Amino acid sequence: MTVQSKRAPRGDLFDVRCPTRDLLDRVGGKWTAMLVKLLDEAGERRFSELSRGAAGISRKMLASTLRDLERDGLVSRRVQPTTPPSVYYELTPLGRSLSEPLATLRNWAESNMRAVDDARIEFDRRS
């Protein structure tokens, strides 16, 4: 059985086999949002620059997230054959197309964080 035959038809988000679920999980991750923003603002960046720019991310998680984004076609990776090798990352056109939707989501989160905090406090008070 091929991978395609195991998947649900496109757009059936409520079907456990829907491939959109996997992609939404990836693009909805906090590290993805940060890395897309960093790369969108600065263009090509080295691994070490991304590590410094995304405060709180471990090197292992950064490497894993970048690998996933590269696999999904959102980020390209270029190795400069120096000693030690320099590795650069950049958004692909597909990755750049994700910048605006993520910016909208970030703006919503920033605008509504106080209301969410208040709701959490109220919920915890009742619980």
Image (cartoon, rainbow, N blue to C red):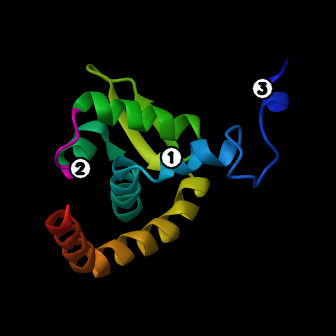
Q: Amino acid at mark 2?
A: Ala
Which residue corresponds to mark 3? Answer: 3
Q: Secondary structure at mark 2?
A: loop
- Alpha-carbon distance for marks 3 and 2? 34 Å
Across and down, in percent, residue 55 comes to 17, 49
Q: Secondary structure at mark 1?
A: helix
Element assignment for label 3: helix
The quadrant in which the N terminus is found is: top right
The residue at the point 39 percent across, 50 percent down is 44
Q: Is residue 86 magenta?
A: no
Instruction: Give the spatial CA distance, label 2 vs label 1.
Output: 19 Å
Contact between marks 3 and 1 (CB within 8 A): the answer is no
* Residue numbers of the magenta segment: 53-58
The image shows residue 103 at horizontal and vertical percentages of 42, 71
Looking at the image, is mark 2 or mark 1 earlier in the sequence? 1
Residue 92 horizontal side relative to residue 89, left or right: right
Query: Which comes sooner in the sequence, label 3 or label 2?
Result: 3
**Disc 3 to disc 1, how far (Cα)?**
19 Å
Residue 81 shows in the view: yes
Give whichever of 32, 123 is nearer the camera: 123
Label 1 sits on residue: 25
* Mark 3 or mark 2, whichever is nearer to me: 3
The residue labelled by disc 2 is 54
